[in-house]
Amino acid sequence: MLYNNKSTQSHHDNHDHCHGDCHNIAHNHTHDSHNENPTVSCDGHNHGHNHGHEIEDPPEEPERSCQGVKLTWKIQGMDCAHCASKIENGVKTLPNINQTKIIFSTEKLIVFVPKHDDAVIKMIEDKVVELGYTPIFEASANQSHHHEHSHNFDKKAFIPLAVLGTLIVVSYLILLVNHTAGEYAFIVTAIVGIIPILKEAIVLTRSGTPFAIESLMSISALGALFIGAAEEATMVIFLFMIGEMLEGFATSKAKKGISSLVELMPDETVIIIDGKRKTVASHTLKPNDIIEISSGGRLPADVILVSEQASIDESALTGESIPVNYLSGDKILAGSLVVDNTIQLKVISESGQNAVDRILQLIEDAEDRKAPIERFIDKFSRYYTPAITLFAFLVVVIPPLLTGADWYTWIYRGLTLLLIGCPCALVISTPAVITSALSTAAKHGVLIKGGAALEHIGSMKMVAFDKTGTLTEGKPQVTDVINLHCSSEELLAIVASIESGSHHPLAKALVDYVKQKQIHFEEALNRKAIAGVGIQGELDQQIYFIVSPNKIETVSTAISAKDAETITQLENGGKTVVVVTTHQQLLGIIALQDVLRSDALAAITELKQLGLQTLMLTGDNQRAAKAIAGQLGIDYRAELLPADKLAEIEKIGQHTSIAMIGDGINDSPAMKAATVGIAMGSGTDVALETADAALTKNSLLSLPKLIRLTRFANRNIKQNITIALGIKLVFLITSLFGITGLWLAVLADSGTTAIVTANALRLLKVKK
């Protein structure tokens, strides 16, 4: 399971009796342990569920399963989406490669090969080095996410820029003294600047990326030298290097949110073996190891608290700033911070499979689930650059050949158009936003599984909720105790005596209530369930029954009209009623009700303010559903089986986009059929796997925050695309008519890339 709420989950054992509508008040949520084994081979490769709705990956996306061995590298120096595509295109041209996938957000290269071969590994690493990056091979899944992970901007990037800038100043000073010598100085400066760019362009062309920005830059700069515009060629190169540096700086900030998750994991941990303390590497920890964490230390794995109590800061994972108090036996997530004192804990997660690792894995998998607009841009950019290159060539040759125009003028304009042909700003406009949004959402206790989910959540028109465990606590509480022929203390003691030891949610609620009242009781004798009726037990040679009101005549006398009216009033209020009786007379009436989450009303109110319609889908009876829906002011459908929920979602989905919020296995079909499925953090493994997003903080107030974030992200994507295409269009026209020159064209290209990246970074500053 991705996340467990700190409160103990109810386990519904085989409890044969049922009080009235108890089967409706507490859904049967199975909480089986679910280990997500790391994939070493593509056989059975599984990244989660297969969506059945509209945001499923399209056919052109890489297949999630293939034959072969999975090899993973951490790539140092991959500071932009353009870099990522260069590496992917370069590696996929190598022999004996089944599939290549680059994960920009976590700087990983994943390659599937037919078999593990050191020669193939070396060949891949040599290719990455040839492209100008440093590969670090991750020999096992356990090593994943435990490496040095820094996204601080590399100050060495200033060195070539400073050298070229100095040469430009020197050349300009020479030009002032001697014009001819100055022109030669600018030619030398341009050649010095173009050599590394030209080398990379040649490598990229040989690797299958002939239309990279380096290639376009090289052609433009060499063309400018050819026509005698050495000063402009130098400025083009200089501005290009500034743009690349700014893009790298902006992108490194965008990825800091992801890398901050990795930095939550301590490298070393104190383990206790036979009473002795020993410091070991955190990734070597195994389930059942006992570890000790001091105040201020972070948890290296998912754990169970062994010490009596602990105050834990979970803000890095859930966004909750107030420390949470845990008791012995409670589960705590990896990456959490110990606040007060030194505590001992038992490890329960495999290496590489703790909460932080699972979040990072899901973020990596999310890059496969591209937003529809992102897929369109990828396709568009494949044709855009070759088309512009062809157009630039035609601009160079047609006017001089057909009209006898000046070759110099049209070569210059053609070279300028080449610089407009790089789609960097357009290509990065969407991934930069999505990476920033995923990072911000993770910090605020929401996990979004990809750009497709992000885009669709932001366009939701209706939100459907499951009731039990989603809108309500999922834990029935005693609301009314009406004693008739005995005192209330005697009545409650009888109930606790008979229900003691049962794991049924209603039974546990009754026993807990009696214990809170500090009423003494002893377990009844001869306790047994009466199928379809209730339960009985013996106290002081007297048989007592706890049954549903409509079953009382099977064990006792009929209920009086007055008592029947009382029961009806309670049931009309959405409460579940049980009666306590002997063979001869009714002893009392007890009502229970599943109470609303404390944040449910506020969350529904915020959703309505955002213009969203709300609906509750529940298997509960009409009276209980009406009572809860009435408190929240929302529409509802009651007495629905999982198949009925599915049908309702499919019916609504035909004419509007709908999100389904749930936490149980019975919600999974409806969540999968909805436009977007969102799981509560305390939900079952099936619900969390089926969902496109998870409220890991287990708070409904995270939902309106999620909607606001995704709407902001969608607006940001549209702004970036408008900026990227708008500036390209403006400079395309002005360059064609000779209004703008080479240096302005490259400034427009690099500047636009920096602008859209900086715009995307605004998502990292979202507070609410």
Image: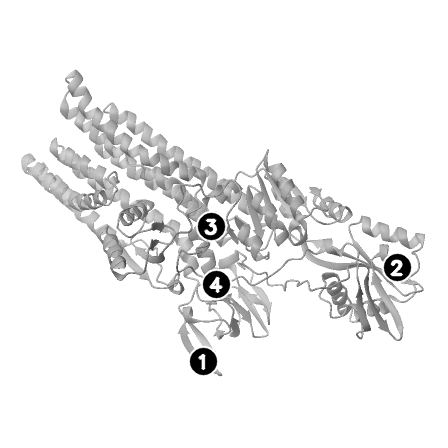
Q: Of the numbered discs in the image, which one, if any, rests on residue 277?
A: 1
User: Disc 2 to disc 4, how far (Cα)?
Assistant: 52 Å
Looking at the image, is mark 2 or mark 4 earlier in the sequence?
Answer: 4
Q: Distance between the residues labelled 1 and 2?
A: 64 Å
Q: Where is residue 45 in the image (x, y as percent from the top left)?
A: 43, 55
Badge nearest the viewer, 2 or 4: 2
The reply to whether the C-beta atoms of the residues labelled 3 and 2 are less than 8 Å apart is: no
Is residue 482 visible in the rendered structure shown here? no
Which residue is rendered at x = 38% and y = 34% of the image?
Answer: 723
Q: Position of residue 465 (x, y in %)?
A: 64, 46
Nearest to N terminus: mark 1 or mark 2: 1
Q: What amino acid does circle 1 point to?
A: Arg
CA separation in Å, label 3 and label 1: 38 Å
Find residue 746 and report its image quarter.
top left
- The residue singled out by tag 4 in the image is 354
Q: Which image quarter is the N terminus in?
A: bottom right
- 1 vs 2, front mark: 2
Left or right of 629 on screen, residue 154:
left
| Mark 1 Cα-neighbour bin, 10 Å: few <14, some 14–19, many ≥20 | some
Q: What residue type is labelled 3?
A: Thr
Neighbourhood count class around disc 2 (C-alpha, 10 Å): few under 14, some 14–19, many 20 upward: few
User: How many numbered marks does the figure carry?
Assistant: 4
Residue occupied by mark 2: 554
Crowd tier of the residue under label 4, counting other residues whose Cα lies within 10 Å: few below 14, some 14–19, many 20 or above: many
- Residue 477 versus residue 55 in the image, above or below: below
Q: Where is residue 766 in the image (x, y as percent from the top left)?
A: 48, 47
Q: Which amino acid does label 2 sit on?
A: Thr
Q: Quadrant of residue 72?
A: bottom left
Task: Give the residue pinned by disc 3.
Answer: 440
Q: Position of residue 450 (x, y in %)?
A: 46, 47
Please indicate, yes or no, whether residue 498 appears anywhere in the rendered image: yes
Depth check: give the residue in front, 532 or 195.
Answer: 532
